[in-house]
Image (cartoon, rainbow, N blue to C red):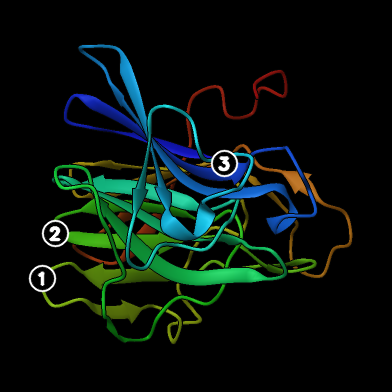
Amino acid sequence: HESRVVGDTLISFGGKCGGDATVNKGHCNDIIVIDLKAWTAKQYCPSSSKGTDWCGSTNTQYLDGAAPPVRYAHASTVHQSMFYVFGGAGESNYLADLWAFDAANPKWTQPTTTGEKPMALAAPRIAVNGGALYVWGGKVSDKVYDNTMYRLDLSSNAWTSDKADSAKVRPVGRQYHTVVAYQQYLVMMGGGGQYPNQDEKTFFNDLWAYDTTSGQWVELVTADAQDSSKP
């Protein structure tokens, strides 16, 4: 699942929920909202999930309208009162859809976007910085990981990417890494994948910063970077 804090609430979405694996392969698409002041929880499920073994508690509210399909290995971030979900692994394939859940008025919407959208990705990471939503990394297929930076302008809902700039210095593609926003940067660390033209998978411990104003990556080398005992 993926969890983020919006105001005074913790929001958690999707993931592997166990139960009957023959139904949606054991994946979920419910939202859990926890009030961090009152310490109470509420579950929101699509109306289509009635009767499943993961929806239907005494604190469940069913939402009419469209909702994200079940998934795990997705990415999430927040902007204002909106909780965004992108990509992940669905019942039979990887996903490339973007959804927004309004925590102030519980409802899912799927933004209508233009431009070069991200490809279907498992375990990418997304973050908001300077009024734009960024998508980086993720698994495309067996032994293939993406390292294109995608940018969605949240005012115009237009996608752009740096895919055409093949000469740009950038990190090796990967999945399950960490990306956080800091000032005008996106700071990325770790993850798992493999180097191009190599068969063995590996875990990474490199640290990079992406400058959202210049569109350039810089690898950050710390004093103990050469210490093999560090994670």
- Residue name at image x 23 percent, y 65 percent: 214
Q: Does residue 87 appear left or right of residue 79 in this picture?
A: right
Crowd tier of the residue under label 1, counting other residues whose Cα lies within 10 Å: few below 14, some 14–19, many 20 or above: few
- Establish if 105 lies above or below 205: below
**Mark 3 falls on what kind of element?**
loop
Q: Foreground: 38 or 127?
A: 38
Q: Give me the disc on residue 155.
A: 1
- Residue 37 at x, y percent in the picture: 20, 12
What's under tag 2, amino acid-wise? Gly
In this view, 124 is above or below 33: below
Mark 1 / mark 3, whichever is N-terminal: 1
- Is 2 situated above or below 41? below
The residue lying at 39 percent from left, 58 percent from top is: 217
Give the foreground label among 2 and 1. Answer: 1
Q: Specify whether residue 174 is in view.
A: yes
Instruction: Classify the position of the C terminus by image quarter.
Output: top right
Of 173 and 107, the residue lying toward us:
107
Residue in the picture at 53% in, 60% down:
137
Q: Position of residue 229 (x, y in %)?
A: 71, 18
The numbered mark at residue 206 is 3
Q: Secondary structure at mark 1?
A: loop
**Mark 2 neighbour density, 10 Å: few (under 14) some (14–19) many (20 or more):** few
Whole-percent x, y for residue 168 in the image = 45, 73
**Is 159 placed above or below 54 here?**
below
The amino acid beneath tag 3 is Asp
- Dot 3 or dot 2: first in sequence order is 2
Residue 28 placement (x, y as % from top left): 58, 48
Residue at numbered disc 2: 131
Identify the secondary structure beneath mark 2. Answer: loop
